[in-house]
């Protein structure tokens, strides 16, 4: 059987099973089964598949038609131009989550401009937390963009943390990220390294070359980013089968309505941000109305919502007010 015929049969089988993005899935699975490049696949559609390649390909097609995500079959997913290993222990990175990285970099640059400082392109002196790191895609993307920053990847699932650390090793940034098993910020009490923070300009904490440790042993951050569980259990039946049956519930569901975790996440973030520090959260498709009011407080300033390409409110960002500098020293 040649490549062209195999691809057509695979597409037809997935289409008959009402599999989303059937053409793309069939193509990716054929690439994976044959270890070919996309260029090779389409430049030589007349090439015959080896029997072992054909068997492997149609086995993958059957599993995809049965609901197993393509990313679990290939073991990988692209995010921010990087290839991540994914397993059933982690949420599959979505393109819309890339907006978190964009907003983070934009807000850090704007903060520097407001302070009349040159943009900190390397991230030197910055301390960043990715809460609920999962595959590590956010932390690793930020490590590639801000190579001198100190990044903490926090994750409650030991299995997910292992996947994230493996991705950091493969992508060459493991030395820039501290991986901690942590329920929100609880694991920071065991994080090492003392340091000094100083009060400068406008009452805001400016980071020195070492992190400051509070009395509870927690690092104070310039930036906290999180893509928390935000799907409501009440919505579970409406999810696509590949999501509902194959992605980890701990990374999907944020309570019965989906937004229950945000209040505690925002409260703890306030305690772990330096004044002037930035909080960036991914939102579910219908969670803005419940989450944005949680930042309606003197403790937060410059609250902004960023829409994704579909026009959905996707990213909520804010800064810890400089007047709350004293809170960081409690």
Image (cartoon, rainbow, N blue to C red):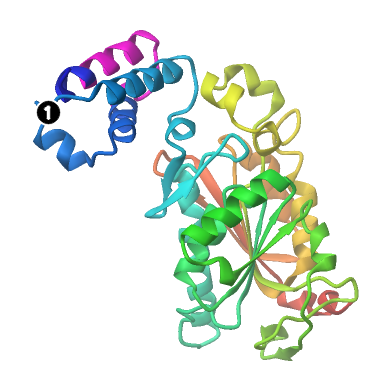
Residue 166 picture location, percent across and down: 56, 54
Q: Is residue 259 left or right of residue 6?
A: right
Q: Secondary structure at mark 1?
A: loop
Question: Which residue lies at the image location 62% right of the left edge and 16% below the top edge?
Answer: 237
> Is 15 covered by the magenta stretch?
yes
Which residue, given by chain and number where applicable, does mark 1 sit on? 47
The quarter of the displayed image where residue 179 is located: bottom right
Using the image as rendered, state which of residue 2 and residue 261 is in the foreground.
2
Q: Is residue 47 left or right of residue 164?
A: left
Question: Which residue lies at the image location 39% right of the left edge and 43% below the top edge?
Answer: 309
Using the image as rendered, state which of residue 135 and residue 52 is in the foreground.
52
Question: Which residue lies at the image location 59% right of the left edge and 38% below the top edge?
Answer: 284
User: Is 130 placed above or below 293 here?
Assistant: below
Residue 54 picture location, percent across and down: 28, 21
Q: Is residue 57 left or right of residue 130?
A: left
Residue 72 picture location, percent across and down: 49, 32
Magenta-colored span = 7-23
Q: Is residue 141 left or right of residue 203?
A: left
């Amino acid at each position: 059987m040649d490549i062209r015929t195999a691809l057509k049969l695979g597409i037809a089988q997935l289409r008959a099973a009402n599999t989303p993005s059937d053409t793309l899935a069939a193509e990716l699975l054929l690439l994976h089964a044959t270890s070919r490049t996309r260029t090779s696949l389409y430049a030589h559609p007349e090439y015959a598949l080896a029997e072992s390649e054909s068997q492997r390909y149609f086995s993958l097609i059957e599993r995809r038609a049965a609901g197993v995500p393509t990313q679990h079959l290939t073991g990988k997913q692209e995010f921010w131009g990087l290839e991540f290993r994914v397993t059933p222990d982690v949420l599959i990175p979505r393109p819309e989550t890339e907006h978190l990285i964009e907003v983070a970099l934009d807000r850090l640059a704007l903060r520097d401009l407001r302070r009349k400082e040159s943009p900190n392109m390397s991230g030197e002196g910055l301390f960043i937390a990715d809460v609920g790191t999962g595959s590590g895609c956010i932390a690793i993307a930020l490590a590639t963009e801000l190579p001198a920053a100190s990044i903490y990847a926090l994750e409650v699932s030991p299995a997910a943390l292992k996947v994230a650390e493996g991705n950091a090793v493969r992508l060459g940034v493991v030395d820039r990220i501290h991986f901690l098993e942590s329920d929100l910020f609880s694991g920071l009490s065991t994080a090492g390294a003392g340091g000094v923070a100083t009060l400068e300009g406008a009452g805001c904490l400016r980071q020195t070359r070492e992190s400051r440790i509070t009395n509870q042993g927690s690092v104070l951050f310039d930036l906290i980013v999180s893509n928390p569980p935000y799907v409501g259990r009440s919505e579970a039946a409406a999810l696509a089968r590949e999501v509902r049956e194959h992605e980890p519930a701990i990374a999907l569901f944020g309570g019965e309505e989906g937004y229950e975790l945000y209040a505690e996440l925002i409260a703890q973030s306030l305690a772990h941000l330096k004044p002037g520090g930035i909080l960036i959260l991914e939102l579910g498709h219908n969670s803005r109305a419940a989450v944005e009011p949680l930042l309606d407080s003197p403790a937060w300033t410059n609250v902004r919502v960023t829409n994704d390409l579909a026009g959905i409110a996707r990213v909520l960002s804010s800064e810890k007010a400089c007047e709350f500098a004293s809170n960081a020293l409690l």
